[in-house]
Image (cartoon, grey):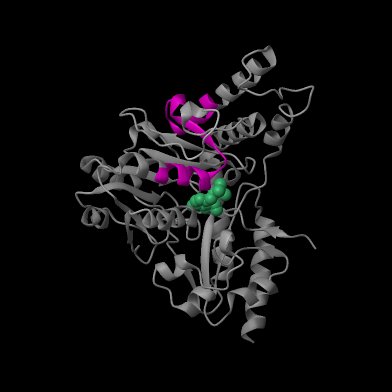
Amino acid sequence: MQTLYMDYAATTPVDPAVAEKMMQYLTSDGCFANPASRAHMLGWFAEQAVEEARLTVAKSIGCDLREIVWTSGATESNNLALKGIAETRKAQGRHIVTSAIEHKAVLDTCSWLETQGFEVSYLKPNAQGLISVEQVKAALRDDTILASFMWINNELGSINPIAEIGAVLQEQGVVFHVDAAQAGGKVAMDLTALPVDLVSFSAHKFYGPKGIGALYVRRDPALKVAAQMHGGGHERGMRSGTLPTHQIVGMAEALRIATDRLDDDFQHLTQIRRQFWQGVSTLDQIAVNGDLERGYPGILNLCFAGVDGESLLMALKNVAVSTGSACNSASVDPSYVLSGIGLSRDKALGSLRFSWGRFTTENEIEQAVASVKHAVAALRG
Ligand SMILES: Cc1ncc(COP(=O)(O)O)c(C=O)c1O
């Protein structure tokens, strides 16, 4: 039985063109040398590949290539941003503002910072999963040094008003970190023009390889981020470690393709979501968690009242979906994101996240709709 992959928010398959390009940077007949090896030409070629990739990424998100720091993914980028700023700014204040429905890579980092003497305010989102400018304004204090909000929520697809929030933070001199793990390669970005200071990216969310990401660090005005990984002083001292040329080249190629296809992919996903919703919305007691109109079309979180999400997951043997964030899939607790937007425990436990991507077909949606309807009817029956 073919599995219908509807868990693109957890990870995407690598684009075949990206995988092919990466192969050229691995084996002895390719560009495999250490990009930090200055003593020979093979090292220079690898360094050139890394710098070309840096330029490609910078162009795709509208920034200077010196503002890109390679990391292992958004978890590391989030850690580096939050801990790195907390460390350099602690003399100015120890208050941080974030939301209750950020990814664990932000929330757990904030919890750790609390053990180090920082105070964190966790703003409560509205029922659609959004943080408002007014809430942010009200939370700021004289000792607030940093705020962190995600661009697109990984469970709901809700899109925060990043530009508006950033304008308020900039005015108050508060450093603004944005977790764009779900937004990179999905929505248009011009970071130089946007009032943001630090932005996290992860390649495996946009058809690149796992294990590579980046942190955008604003240069004007220059921002000092304390290194969290010590060693050879790579990445202008912010992140030591031998650069994985094949991963970096893969990330850049994936982002280049995603940026070229931005509108096509968005339209495709809008059509896919519409088809799926039209199909399943005829079921009784089904509701959208989040915002069907304004949310990112690649994600649809649905509540099937009276149905246990885990049982539905089991019944949907041919559909790969998630009951929440994949990173928490071992837990039987309701998703903290769904609880965070005010869903009851039962409703949160009766919800599933469907997420689609570039390779999802109308035929797959047709099959998935039939499977969902059949499984829900069987469980309710
Ligand atoms: C919003 C968000 N932030 C951070 C991460 C972590 O990214 P990575 O897998 O690259 O560490 C994810 C991945 O699930 C995510 O969705």
Is residue 59 visible from the viewing direction of this image? no
Q: Position of residue 226 (x, y in %)?
A: 41, 37
Query: What is the magenta range?
Result: 54-83
Examine the rendered structure and indicate whether residue 95 appears above or below residue 325: above
Q: Position of residue 4 (x, y in %)?
A: 70, 59
Q: Residue at x 43, y 63 (%)?
A: 290
Answer left or right for 263 relative to 115: right
Q: Residue at x 45, y 65 (%)?
A: 337
Q: Residue furthest left?
A: 142
Quarter placement of the C terminus = bottom right
Residue toward you, 224 or 317: 224
Q: Position of residue 270 (x, y in %)?
A: 52, 52
Answer left or right for 367 relative to 353: right
Answer left or right for 287 relative to 22: left
Quarter placement of the N terminus = bottom right
Residue 329 belongs to the span the image colors magenta: no
Q: Toward which corner of the image does residue 117 lie, by quadrant?
A: bottom left
Is residue 76 visible from the viewing direction of this image? yes
Most frequent secondary structure within the magenta stretch? helix
Residue toward you, 236 or 191: 236
Q: Residue at x 55, y 33 (%)?
A: 260
Q: Residue at x 44, y 53 (%)?
A: 109
Residue toward you, 362 or 27: 27
Residue 79 belongs to the span the image colors magenta: yes
